[in-house]
Amino acid sequence: MKIKGVIAMITTRYIGIILSALVYMLPNLVNAEEHIVNAAAREFKPAIIYVQPGDTVKFTNMTSHNSVTYLVPEGGTGWGEKGKMAGGTFITPAIDAEGIYGYVCEPHIGFGMVGVVVVGGVSADDKAAMKERAMAELQGPFKRLIGKINKIKPTLK
């Protein structure tokens, strides 16, 4: 009898933990949106998008393109595989960390095919810090991301 009681208590505890985790994660799962970026001949449309944590970005028309992050905020996870084409469509994992993500199409970087995803609240100071980081870290045509960062409209004061 004691063993059945212990098993029931452990089972109840694990169910409680799982339910607590779902309650915590559910708002992001329910409210998450998928945003679309189209890869045109030599540019991403739109080149700058504003999303919320938990959202995804779907890149379409990617047969001769890729989307690879070269600037990722602290705590963020980039996407794309350097040197690998995306195929017809590519969807990012859920983007959870707030900040500025700079990405490029490697085959068309020479044409300035770059873009930015702004996640959540970003201040003018955040924008300036990412621009400074881009100036220090990026080389050659990858510095074209700086032009897109300059066009970001801060979402926080």
Image (cartoon, rainbow, N blue to C red):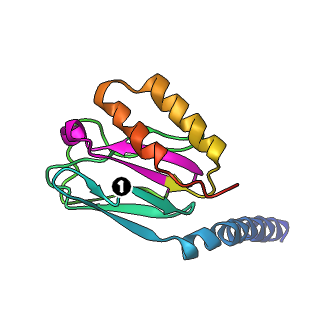
Q: Is residue 112 magenta?
A: yes
Image quadrant where one finds the N terminus:
bottom right
Q: Which residue corresponds to the image point at 18% horizontal and 54% vertical from the top-left?
A: 87
Which percent across, then down, holds residue 11? 72, 68
Among the 4 quarters of the image, the one containing residue 112: top left
- Rendered position, 35 above or below 83: below
Among the 4 quarters of the image, the one containing residue 8: bottom right
Which percent across, then down, holds residue 2? 85, 67
Any part of residue 78 in sight: no
| Left or right, residue 120 beside residue 16 | left
Given residues 98 and 25, the one toward you in this image is: 98
Q: Which residue corresponds to the image point at 68% horizontal and 67% vertical from the top-left?
A: 18
Mark 1: which amino acid?
Ala
Given residues 93 and 112, the one toward you in this image is: 112
User: Mark 1: which secondary structure?
Assistant: loop
Any part of residue 60 in sight: yes
Given residues 29 and 129, the one toward you in this image is: 129
Q: Which residue corresponds to the image point at 81% horizontal and 68% vertical from the top-left?
A: 9
Magenta extent: 95-117
Which percent across, then down, holds residue 84? 22, 41
| Left or right, residue 47 beside residue 127 | left
Which percent across, then down, holds residue 122? 61, 51
Image quadrant where one finds the C terminus:
bottom right
Marker count (numbered):
1
Q: Is residue 129 magenta?
A: no
Q: Which residue is mark 1?
A: 47
Q: Which residue corresponds to the image point at 59% horizontal and 51% vertical from the top-left?
A: 98
